Every structure is written in structure tokens, then in C-alpha cells.
Amino acid sequence: MNFAPEHPGIPLVMAEFGSAEDPANPSKANWIADAQQMFKQSGYERFEAASYWNATSHNYVNCDFKITSSTNALTAFKTMANDPFYSGQVS
């Protein structure tokens, strides 16, 4: 978000965003739902694309960024993907 004001007039892409599931507090689904709403807020309208980092970390043991790390995370991601806001249709 620091980059955006310095480069007005160009579309933005969130090249990678993601979260690992915390076994002690499995709230990745909430994090995804929060991201779904965040991109709809004022200040994020220049984002034209977002890409989820869907991998397991090679550097940190048990750091699973995959969207399938839990049933709840997958369900939240599907909800986000099926939200008409993310249809890719230009309004």
C-alpha cells in the first residue's frame, strides 16, 4: 500500500498473498474471509488481480500455505472465489 500512492494511475496486482494454518489457533478461514472483504474497501479499488500463494514452505517445517490446509480454509476460499466481486468482469 506504500507503493500505490507513489504510482498513481496504474492498476495493481497482489502477486502473492497467503497464510499458514496455525494448529494452535486454526483461523485461516477467518483470515481469508477478512481478505475477501478487505479488497472491497476503499483504497483497494486499483487492485485488478490477486494471486494466492498455494504451497508448503521449504524453509519452515509445518508451514503450510496451501488452501487445502483445512476444510474451513478451503470453504472460505471457495466462498471468496464465488463472490461476484471477484468474477473478473469489468463494471
Image (tube, helix red, strand yellow):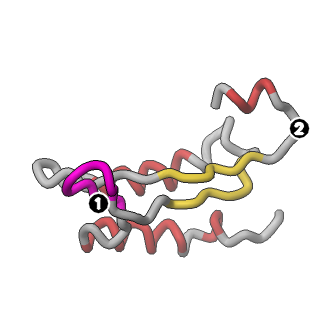
From the top left corner, tell me how far across and down residue 46 is, in percent: 76, 45
Query: Depth-wise, is mark 1 or mark 2 nearer the camera?
Result: 1
Q: If the image is split into quadrants, where does the N terminus sit?
A: top right
Furthest residue in direction right, as rendered:
9
> Residue 64 — which label?
1
In the displayed structure, would residue 67 be above or below residue 48?
below
Confirm whether the magenta stretch covers residue 59. yes
| Amino acid type at image mark 1 | Asp
Q: Quick one: SS at disc 2?
A: loop
The secondary structure that most of the magenta stretch takes on is loop
- Residue at image point 32% right, 72% down: 68
Q: Amino acid at mark 2?
A: Gly
Percent position (x, y) of residue 18?
43, 53
Looking at marks 1 and 2 on the same chain, the residue that comes earlier in the sequence is marked by 2
Using the rendered view, name the quadrant where residue 58 is placed: bottom left
Question: Is 24 one of the magenta-colored residues?
Answer: no
12 left or right of 39 in image:
right
> In this picture, which residue range is highlighted in magenta?
57-65
| Residue 30 x %, y % | 33, 53
Say which residue label 2 marks: 9
Left/right of residue 84 with respect to residue 67 in the rendered view: right
Count up the numbered dots. Answer: 2
Cα–Cα gap, marks 1 and 2: 36 Å
Tell me the residue at 73%/32% (across/down): 4
**Quadrant holding the C terminus:** bottom right
Tell whether 89 sits left or right of 51. Answer: right
